[in-house]
Amino acid sequence: MFKIERIAIVGVGLIGGSTALALKRAGVVGEVIGVGRNAASLAEAKRLNVIDRACDLAEAAAIADCILIATPVRQMPAIFATVAPHLKANALVMDAGSTKQDVVAAARIGLDHKIAQFVPAHPIAGREIAGVAAADAALYKGKKVVLTPVVENPPEAIARAEAIWRACGATVQAMSAEAHDAIFAAVSHLPHLLAFALVDEFAGRPNAKTLFAFAASGFRDFTRIAGSHPEMWRDIALNNREALLAEMDLYIKKIGQFRELVAQSDAAQIEAVMQRSHDAKANWLAGDLEYFRDESV
């Protein structure tokens, strides 16, 4: 069993806090150091035993054996630059960002010749609630964590990163940063923007009070992720802009086609679209990925 003497969590919210709790539960970490912008949040994290103590970023970088940066992605360039001069020679740095090409580019600038110590990561385990009070030691159980290693990473750095996430209960998969950003623009970033847009559109209508008074489970389920962290998702939308715009265009095209079927009262084709969607969802939930084609492999 490996052991991390000290891990610094930069951004002790849902993801950072859950990582700390999971590693504590697994018995693989000696001390958890919290770093953040909000003193009250860090005090709450200590009260909840998520972290053992708090300190500033430079001090944490100088003593930590592993640093997890779990902040919105647009905060990361400054964090990399602050960490770099203080980073221990054998320390591992990871992020938990939902975009990867931008984070890798920022790490190359900020960490410079220490880039080999950085293994980019994305835990696929978010919830629509934020803050350290939502942290859960079981958040990663059975969930995926995607690593997008850089060419400079030695095998032992990747192996350490994999071991940390497996200790949290996750399964680990590697892919390129480019593939990651394209995939998650479709399956994560687009759905979040759709949920935010629909709630905002309803809230801006003259009859918004009536609409929300009668909104029930369908609206609640579709818009659940509109309760997600706005700053985090703003950064994701901007930093994965090109891939996200491509996905938005495809969705707008599909909605336009569906609108035309409704306008023409084409019952057969409306039902055909719904049936295909129904079948695809059922096979996905059943774990039958062989149902779907994949021409990218």
Image (cartoon, helix red, strand yellow):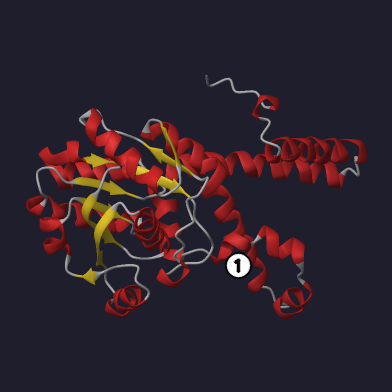
**Res. 112 image quadrant:** top left
Q: How many marks?
A: 1
Q: Residues within 10 Å of mark 1 (few under 14, many from 20)?
A: few
**In front here: 95 or 253?**
95
**In front here: 47 or 206?**
47
Is residue 99 visible in the rendered image? The answer is no
Seen in the picture, residue 259 relative to 228 is either above or below; the reply is above
The residue that label 1 is drawn on is: 200
Left or right, 116 with respect to 294, comes to left
Left or right, 89 with respect to 245, comes to left
**Res. 116 image quadrant:** top left
**In x, y percent, where is residue 253?**
66, 40
The residue lying at 26 percent from left, 66 percent from top is 34
**In front here: 294 or 70?**
70
Seen in the picture, residue 214 relative to 145 is either above or below; the reply is below
Is residue 280 visible in the rendered image? The answer is yes
**In front here: 72 or 15?**
15
User: If the image is split into quadrants, where does the N terminus sit?
Assistant: top left
Provide the secondary structure element on which disc 1 rests: helix
The residue lying at 31 percent from left, 63 percent from top is 11
**In x, y percent, where is residue 124?**
48, 47
The residue lying at 53 percent from left, 45 percent from top is 142
Looking at the picture, which amino acid does disc 1 mark?
Asp
**In x, y percent, where is residue 51?**
30, 68
Seen in the picture, residue 207 relative to 279 is either above or below; the reply is below
